Amino acid sequence: MKSDQPQFSIIGDVSVDLVLGTLDHWPKRGTEQLFPRSELRAGGSAANSALAARHLGLSPHLIGAIGDDDLAQWLLLQLSGIRVELQTCSSDTTMSVGLMHPDGERTFFTSCGHLQHLSPDFVLKHLPSAPPGSVALFTSPFLLSGLREGFGELLAQASAQGYQVALDTGWPPEGWTAQVQREVAGWLAHCDHLLINELEAMSIAETQQLELAVQRVAALLKPGAHLVVKLGAAGALGHVDGRSTRYATQAAADIFDTVGAGDSFNTGYLAARLNGAGLDDALAAGCRTASAILPRFPRKSIAAGELSHCLQPHS
C-alpha cells in the first residue's frame, strides 16, 4: 500500500516466549519447581518491538519467520493488528523459556527452531522502497544465521531503498571474538541509529570505560549517525557528531518481568524519531515507553494505543 507517511519496518527474530518466576535459587536436578507467575506470549526482539509499537498506537511492519507447527498459528494470533510478513520455515517454531530472578536478572533457554532459516531474499521482497524519514529496525542478527553472512549488504540495500537503518546487535553466542569484531564493524558503517546496551558497547570497543567505548563505537558509524547506549534502570546515553547526552530515569517500583526492556526502549526512541523528535526527546520517549511496559504483567493486557502518551513531550 502506497503512502507518503514514513514507514516503521522491523526485521528480525519472532518466536514464542514462556516467562516464569520468580526463581531465587537453582533447583536440585531431578526435582520439580512451581512458579506463581507465568505468561506465554509472542517473543523475540523483533516481535517485542512490534508489540511495543502497537501499544504506542503505531502501525508497524514486521518481517520475520515462523515454523510450520501449531505454535506458529498461535503466534500469528498474538500479532493481530500488526502488518506481518513471516516466512514459513520447515521447522518447529523457536521457543524461549525465560526464568525471572529476584534481582531482575533473567536466564533464558532457547531452542534453535526456525530462526536460522529466515532468508535475505524474503526480507528484501517484503521491504519495499519507503518515503523519506522511514526507519528499518534490524534485530538479533547473531540468531539469524540465514541472514548473517550477507547482513552488511542487507543493511546497505535497506538504506538504498530510503530507510534510516537502525540496528540492535544483541549478543553473539560465540562471544566478541576478533572475527565478530570485524563482522560487526562492517555492519555499523551502514547504521543511522545503533541501539546497544552498555556491556555491548564496551565489548565492541574492547574497553571497560564507557566514555571511551562511546567514542570508539561512534567512529565506526556513518557520519551523522546516532549511537544510543541503554543503561538499564539508569536511563540511556545518546551520542551524535561528537556530542553526548544522558537521560536519567526515575527509580522504578519492583518489576517482575524485565524481558523486552531494551526492545521497548528501541521502539519508543524510534517512534519519537519518526515523529521528528531530536535526540534528547527521543531518549526520553524510549525510557518512558520501557517504564510503562515493564511493570505490566501479563503484557497481553495492554491495549493497542494505550501507551501513546509515552510519545508526548514532557515539560
Image (cartoon, rainbow, N blue to C red):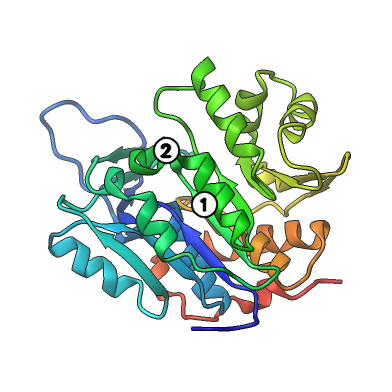
**Residue at figure coordinates x 33%, y 31% from the top left:** 25
Mark 1: which amino acid? Phe
Judge whether residue 152 can be spotted in this image: yes
Q: Position of residue 152 (x, y in %)?
A: 53, 40
**Residue at figure coordinates x 55%, y 80% from the top left:** 306
**Numbered disc in front, either 1 or 2:** 2
Q: Is residue 53 above or below residue 267?
A: below
Which comes before the other along the chain, label 1 or label 2?
1
Mark 1 to mark 2 CA distance (whole Å): 11 Å
Q: Secondary structure at mark 1?
A: strand
299 left or right, relative to 188: left
Which of the numbered marks, if any, corresponds to residue 259?
A: none
Q: Position of residue 168 (x, y in %)?
A: 56, 45
User: 253 or 108: nearer the eye?
Assistant: 108
Q: Secondary structure at mark 2?
A: helix
Classed neighbour count for the residue bearing mark 1: other residues with Cα under 10 Å, few (<14), some (14–19), many (≥20): many
Q: Which residue is mark 1?
A: 138
Q: Residue furthest top?
A: 178
User: 125 or 31: nearer the eye?
Assistant: 125
Q: Is residue 200 above or below residue 179?
A: below
Q: Position of residue 91 (x, y in %)?
A: 16, 50
Q: Position of residue 34 (x, y in %)?
A: 21, 47
Q: Quadrant of the C terminus?
A: bottom right
Q: Is residue 97 above or below residue 181?
A: below
**Residue at figure coordinates x 67%, y 23% from the top left:** 205
Q: Quadrant of residue 199?
A: top right
**Residue at figure coordinates x 73%, y 27% from the top left:** 213
Classed neighbour count for the residue bearing mark 2: other residues with Cα under 10 Å, few (<14), some (14–19), many (≥20): some
Judge whether residue 106 can be spotted in this image: no
Q: Which residue is mark 2?
A: 148
Mark 2: which amino acid? Arg
167 left or right, relative to 251: left
